[in-house]
Structures are given as C-alpha cells and as structure tokens.
Amino acid sequence: MSAPYDFVEEPAPPLESEVLSPVEALAPPTKLPLGLSSQTLLVASCFLAVILLAIFLVARRKSRTKGTALLIVGASDAGKTAILTTLAYNQTLPTQTSMQTNSSIVTLPGTHKTMLVIDVPGHPRVRNQFRDYMQDAKAIAFVVDASTVSRNGANVAEHLHEVLHALSSLPPSATPPSLVIVAHKADALKTAASASASQLAVNRVRTVLERELEKRRASHSGVGIEGLGDDERGAQEGEIGMGDVLECPSGGEFRFERWEGGEVQFIGTSVTIGKSAETGQDEKETEEDGLKPLREWLTELP
Ligand SMILES: Nc1nc2c(ncn2[C@@H]2O[C@H](COP(=O)(O)OP(=O)(O)O)[C@@H](O)[C@H]2O)c(=O)[nH]1
Ligand SMILES: [Mg+2]
C-alpha cells in the first residue's frame, strides 16, 4: 500500500526530551508505514473515542434539559396578564379577556437571566393550550384570585387538576417544570393590621384547593379516561387516569405536600393596578412590590 503523503517517508527524529509513557518504555515502538508508532495510533484513537463519547453525552444531556420559559396559567380574570406586564414593563396595562396567548421576554432583577414568559388565556375553551408549551417550560405559575377563590374553588380546582395531570403524564425522559401556585390579589383581602395579606392569601388558596381537589379525587377514584369529556378523551388516550393523579401515598385525603407528582410551592402576590410602579433602583424596597415573591422564586429556580 503506497503512502498518500510525501512527508511520511522521513520519520521525525525522536526528541531528547520526549517523555515515554510506561507502555512506550516497556515495548520498543514499532514503526508503521505512515511513520507513526503503534502506540501513537493507540493514544490517538483513545483520544478520538473520548471526544466522541463527550459529544454524545453533551447531545444526550441537551435533549433532556428542560425548557426555559415560564408559563402563566389560571382562570380568566385571575390576574395573569397583569402579572406578565408587571414583570415585563413594571406596570399594568388595561387588558381585555383575551383568547390569545401573550408573551414577553423578562429580565430577572439582580441577574442577567432572561426568561420567556407566556401568558396562556384561561377561557375554558382554550386553556388547554398550555399543553402545547409544556415542553418549553422551565416553570409553571398557576395564578389564583385569592379574593374570589372561595366562590370559584370548584372551577379553579378543575383547571389545576388538568395541569397536575399534564405534569404527571410527561415522558420519563423529560424534566418536569417546577410548579408554583400564586395566591394573587392579596391586596384585595381584608386583613387584621398585624396579619400578612400574602400569607392569608396563601392559606386561603391552599385550603380551598385542597378541599376541592380532595372532592375530585374521591369522585374520580379509579376513573380513567372514561371520566373525561369527548375532547379530552381523544387527547389523553393511554395516559394515567385523572383520578389517579391525585392519589397520595398511603391513601387518605389529597394534600399538596404529599402529592407524588412533585413539589408544589405557594406564594402570595399582588400588583399595583393602573399606574406605573415607579420603584427606582436605589429607592428602598417597600411592601409595594407585590411580585417580589414571584421574582425571587424565579431567580432561585434550578
Ligand atoms: N386588586 C387587585 N386587582 C388585580 C390584581 N391583579 C390584577 N387585578 C385586576 O384583575 C382583573 C383581571 O386581570 P387580568 O390580568 O386581565 O387577568 P387575566 O384574565 O388572568 O389575564 C383586572 O381588572 C386587573 O386590574 C391585583 O394584584 N390586585
Ligand atoms: Mg389575560
């Protein structure tokens, strides 16, 4: 076999300072037609194998990493668009109930991290669109109007049940997005001067939702896709039953802290309506920034 390159005819003279590996030191190097020793070839192919393995691992890891977006879901009028515009522009803009998704890039304060924030409309006919964005989601904020949850609990729980079901139905290879339940409009609650409005909002939302989800667990128990409407049934064929999603280990009532599908966090928030919240950088942080808990939660996401 003829060598393809001219320079291979003259092997490079060995360097005085060349350090021999233990393998080289033991076995006298045999020269191949290309002028390379078998040891050099061995080392080169090991090196190549390591590089290929690294490329494979990085590619595999990339396909498993979770998305980068924040999905804001929840009933109509819960305050989703107000939260989005406050995160993005530090003010609320007059909005109408929308059937369309709004989105905006938000920079998290104190960091250079940016996030795509997607506000999915809450109208019952379109709210299931959130499933289309699940793969891109790093986090889901389920927004609940704390001032009306006592009246709307059953509807809100039905919507949340769909979100919990979607989270549980993700393929095992996907990293599920983090879930936070946002007890919003804390400012609209009547509190005793000493009590924290956001803590009251969280307690109220958690209590109502646990009660309503427990009712759903008890009535759906063992019900698979038969328990769903026609539209849902087609889409969820083959997935876990709706009732099973709410089962907690060792039986018993539904409790968020015992939910097996993942950790569910709660925060209480509010936004300033109608005017720009002009909080300058050096102005000291006041109670006014009602979205602080949400910003902090987003900053601390893994
Ligand atoms: N009191 C109070 N009202 C709010 C708050 N956030 C939103 N709202 C009001 O709630 C209504 C619905 O808000 P919107 O963002 O359009 O809700 P969406 O349908 O979930 O997007 C609007 O009239 C807002 O002004 C809040 O933190 N406190
Ligand atoms: Mg809206």
Image (cartoon, rainbow, N blue to C red):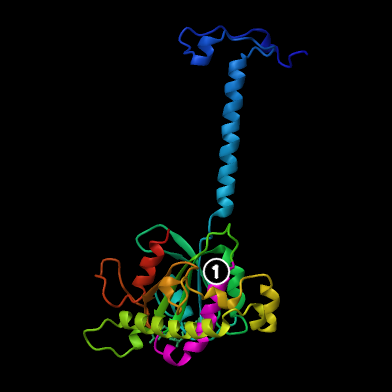
Magenta stretch encompasses residue 75: no
Q: Which residues are magenta?
A: 146-169
The percent coordinates of residue 226 (x first, y second) are: 67, 81
The percent coordinates of residue 21 (x first, y second) are: 49, 16
The majority secondary structure of the magenta stretch comes to helix
Q: Looking at the image, is 25 positioned above or below residue 274?
A: above
Specify few, some or many for label 1: CA neighbours under 10 Å numbering under 14, 14-19, or 20 or more.
many
Instruction: Please give left or right for residue 8 compared with residue 209 in the image.
Output: right
**Farthest right residue in view:** 1
Frontmost residue, 110 versus 217: 217
Frontmost residue, 278 versus 61: 61
Residue 3 lies in quadrant = top right
Label 1 beta carbon within 8 A of ligand 1: no
Name the residue located 60 percent from the left edge and 21 percent from the top edge: 42
Residue type highlighted by circle 1? Leu
Could you tell me if residue 3 is visible in this image?
Answer: yes
Residue 190 lies in quadrant = bottom left
**Farthest left residue in view:** 194
**Farthest bottom residue in view:** 151
Frontmost residue, 237 versus 86: 237
Magenta stretch encompasses residue 161: yes
Residue that numbered label 1 is attached to: 167
Q: Looking at the image, is 213 positioned above or below residue 295?
A: below
Could you tell me if residue 102 is visible in this image?
Answer: no
Name the residue located 53 percent from the left edge and 78 percent from the top edge: 161
Q: Secondary structure at mark 1?
A: helix
Name the residue located 57 percent from the left edge and 71 percent from the top edge: 166
Quadrant of the picture in which ligand 1 is shown: bottom left
Instruction: Please give left or right for residue 79 compared with residue 54 in the image.
Output: left
The percent coordinates of residue 78 (x first, y second) are: 46, 84
